[in-house]
Structures are given as structure tokens and as C-alpha cells.
Amino acid sequence: MRHPEEAALRPPATALRFFGEREVSSAGSVAVPFAPVHGILLISINIFSPPVRQVSSAELPLAVLILDGMVSKVVRLFFLLLPLGLQGQLVYRIGGVVGGQYSRLRSDVFVTSSGQVAPLVGFAFLVRPRPGGWEVAQEVVLTRGGAYARAVYFRAEQPPEEHLYLYAFYTFETSLWLGVRPLRHFPLRLQVGGFLGGNFDYLHRRQRELMVGHYENINRAIRAVELNDAFSGMDFGPAVGVAVGEGRLRVGGRYYIGARNLYRYLDFAPSGPYIRTSALRVSLTCFLK
């Protein structure tokens, strides 16, 4: 049987009944059944458990109990309605990507004569608020990179003979972008992001007489084919770009800067030299309805 003073201090049931009834035990544990919301969630909250002194329900003021109940119910209601609110405010789009790229190689081992032009194909995934001036996009593409390097063929008692050696590789990469629309009435978006890709080369080793590294002294030069394995590995780096378009079609231009030193993928290679990639891409994205 309850003490009269304890019954007088207990708040009315209507003041504490919102999603379910809460009970305060003498140990200070507050259990809140959350069953009315789809009948599957039960939340137990320990709020009155001091490390030294146990607080009973008779010692808690009525205002503290009511205020604590209101705060916990508001928090639960917020997290319950947050996914529903975001679902109505975000726009998800997916589409295909086609285009082309012009890639180059930056290195102190060889001199790049010209870049490599190649097509690209992939798909894009976009998330943006409605309405809003920003968006997050991800692209996954398959393309080909590389460049033509200057190489020489040393001949006895004659000047070196000039040649070109193609360093080419396929790359399967993904990139993540953050786009901002600076002008409200013009569909232009400035983009910044980064990429991560896996390279694999398809080079042969038949042209073993061509040399790079040094174009005048054969003793300081290296065979061009010995650098082929550098183009099989991971590559990553920052990227910037712009995109123009509204609706289903969008045209974009981006510049990728490889930060990974591909020279380190060579076995038993001395430290110091570097080989890095860069690419300029133009693409057309067609989103589904």
C-alpha cells in the first residue's frame, strides 16, 4: 500500500501519457514502453541513477517528472519524423554517362610528347534537396589513360634516333562530387571532389631497344618497357569541374589531378623519380525519369 504523501507527489496519468506510460521505480530507472508506434519499439532510459546516492520517486518534484517526460517525447518524435521529412525533400536520380577524355603523364623519368584521347562510359548517381543550391553526385566510369613518351634508339657512333613510346592503361574508377549552384536562374554548377581508380595496363615488351630517362647517355638511360608495370595499381587525387544543364540532360567538364606516384609500383625501383597522371574530361549525363 502506498504512502499518502507518495501518492500526492505522483503526477496525473494524463500528464505522462503520450506514447506510453512511464513508471519510476525506487532504484531510479525510468522505463518507457514505445509500443503504440507500430507496437515494436521499447525504450528504457536510465536518468535518475546517481553514482553515490539513489533517488526514489517520492523525492522527485512533480515539475521535474513532467518536464523530463515532455523532453524525451519531443526527442523521440523528432527522430521518428526526421526520415519522413528528408524523404520528401531529397531528390534521387540515376543515369548513364558517355564522353571522352584527354590524359597526360607527368614525370621526371621521361618527356611526354602528347596525350592520349579515349572514350569513357559509366553511370552517375545524384542526390540533391528540393529546392536547394547544392548536390552530391557519384560517378563510376571505365576509360583509358596514358600518353606518348619521347624515347630514343642509341646507335653506335651516330646520333640517337628519336621515337615515341606509348604508355597506356585502362582505368576503372569512382569519383565523389559536391556541386554548388552560384546563380539561381542559370543551370551552372561548380563541382569539387576526388577520385579513386584501379589501373591495369595492356602493354607488351617487344620494343626493348627504346630508351628513356636520359636521351644522350646510354649508361644513364633505362629501357622504356621497364616502366610498364608502373601503370598497374591504384590511383587517386582531387578533381574540379563544372556542369551545365537542367532536367534529364547535363554536360560536364572536369580536370583530374593524380596524386599517387605510380613509379612506386615498380619492383626494386630507386626512390626519387615520379610518374603521375592528369586528365581532362567532357561528358554527357542522361538521367532517368
Image: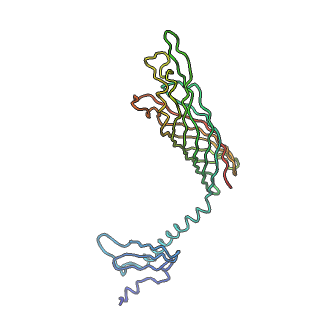
Q: Count all numbered tags in the image, as a single digit.
A: 0
Name the residue nearer the viewer: 17 or 206.
Answer: 206
Q: Is residue 214 left or right of residue 116?
A: left
Measuring 50% from the left and 39% from the top, which residue is drawn there?
235
Measuring 33% from the left and 71% from the top, which residue is drawn there?
50
Figure check: 241 above or below 287:
above
Residue 45 percent coordinates (x, y): 41, 72
In the displayed image of the protein, which residue is found farthest to the top?
157
Figure check: 113 above or below 280:
above
Question: Which scheme is used to colour this image of the protein?
Answer: rainbow
Name the residue nearer the viewer: 206 or 13.
Answer: 206
The quarter of the picture where the C terminus appears is bottom right
Residue 97 percent coordinates (x, y): 64, 46
In the displayed image of the protein, which residue is found farthest to the front?
206
Measuring 48% from the left and 19% from the top, which residue is drawn there?
214
Name the residue nearer the viewer: 98 or 87.
Answer: 98
Measuring 61% from the left and 40% from the top, which residue is drawn there?
254
Residue 246 percent coordinates (x, y): 69, 50
Residue 273 percent coordinates (x, y): 44, 28
Name the residue nearer the viewer: 260 or 200.
Answer: 200
> Quarter of the image holding residue 30?
bottom left
The quarter of the picture where the N terminus appears is bottom left
Figure check: 191 above or below 13:
above
